[in-house]
Image (spheres, rainbow, N blue to C red):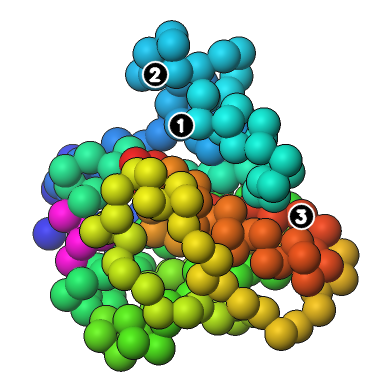
């Protein structure tokens, strides 16, 4: 149950979905962040940033194959122990109702993002059967939007089992059979780690004619 002494600090919408004890365990991403991926720059060592970008994003944009593919990523919270626990329960234990936990934070962020349609990062048929539902799609529905399933995914090893290098050099696993002329697309996923998954998805959509791709993730790893 919510602690009534704290609920006045939150909107009515926020208090509907989570008690304050849980709410305060999420560390919202605030302050100066990388303009490309939302990595908090105050917590980034000087050798891993330059100006208003982190070194990872500078490297992505220096690669002609990936430059300009993903316009901007927005993330809501730090991938701390509590966020890991919640996302793990949501993804791997089939707790569908946890999709509503993120609604207040997502709705606030969506007010700052320009987009024409929202696309969830898809699961392969095998992974969808294993998990029972697409977590990104469930979040979109919980927020009152209709997901646009423009992408399909080829089955591959779980991302969590891959090293950072393997994620960055991931083979293309996404496909689309639809032309998407001049659309601003917002991708939804759970965690931004290296940005590889989102960029691979964005690349397919850009090649299909999309005007621009931004992304929104629950956590920034």
N-terminal of the two: label 1 or label 3?
1
User: Which class describes the residues within 10 Å of circle 1: few (<14), some (14-19), or many (20+)?
Assistant: many
Q: Nearer the viewer, residue 172 or 74?
A: 172
The C terminus: image quadrant: top left
Mark 2 residue element: loop
**Residue on which disc 1 sits:** 39
The residue that appears at 30% across and 67% down in the rendered structure is: 158
Using residue 69 as the reference point, say whether residue 91 is left or right of it: left
**Residue on which disc 2 sits:** 44
**Residue on which disc 3 sits:** 212
Q: Are marks 2 and 3 in contact (CB under 8 Å)?
A: no
The N terminus: image quadrant: bottom left
Using residue 103 as the reference point, say whether residue 88 is left or right of it: left
How many numbered marks have been drawn onto this rendered protein structure? Answer: 3
Q: Are marks 2 and 1 in contact (CB under 8 Å)?
A: yes
- Dominant secondary-structure state across the stretch colored magenta: helix
User: Which class describes the residues within 10 Å of circle 3: few (<14), some (14-19), or many (20+)?
Assistant: some
Mark 1 residue element: loop
Name the spot of residue 210 as percent of width and height, x first. Answer: 79, 64
What span is colored magenta in the figure? 85-89
């Amino acid at each position: 149950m919510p602690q009534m002494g704290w609920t006045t600090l939150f909107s009515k919408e926020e208090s509907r979905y989570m008690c304050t004890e849980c709410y305060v365990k999420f560390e919202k991403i605030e302050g100066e962040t990388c303009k490309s991926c939302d990595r908090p720059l105050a917590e980034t060592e000087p050798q891993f940033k330059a100006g208003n970008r982190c070194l990872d994003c500078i490297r992505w944009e220096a690669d002609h194959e990936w430059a300009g593919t993903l316009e901007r990523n927005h993330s809501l919270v730090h991938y701390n122990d509590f966020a890991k626990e919640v996302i793990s329960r949501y993804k791997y234990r089939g707790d569908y109702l946890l999709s509503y936990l993120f609604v207040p934070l997502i709705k606030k962020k969506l007010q700052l993002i320009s987009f024409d349609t929202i696309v969830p990062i898809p699961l392969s048929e095998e992974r969808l059967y294993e998990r029972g539902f697409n977590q990104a799609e469930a979040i979109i529905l919980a927020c009152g939007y209709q997901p646009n399933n423009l992408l399909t995914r080829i089955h591959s090893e779980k991302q969590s089992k891959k090293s950072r290098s393997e994620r960055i050099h991931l083979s293309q696993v996404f496909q689309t059979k639809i032309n998407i002329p001049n659309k601003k697309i917002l991708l939804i996923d759970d965690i931004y780690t290296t940005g590889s998954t989102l960029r691979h998805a964005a690349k397919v959509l850009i090649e299909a004619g999309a005007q621009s791709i931004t992304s929104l993730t629950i956590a920034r790893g």
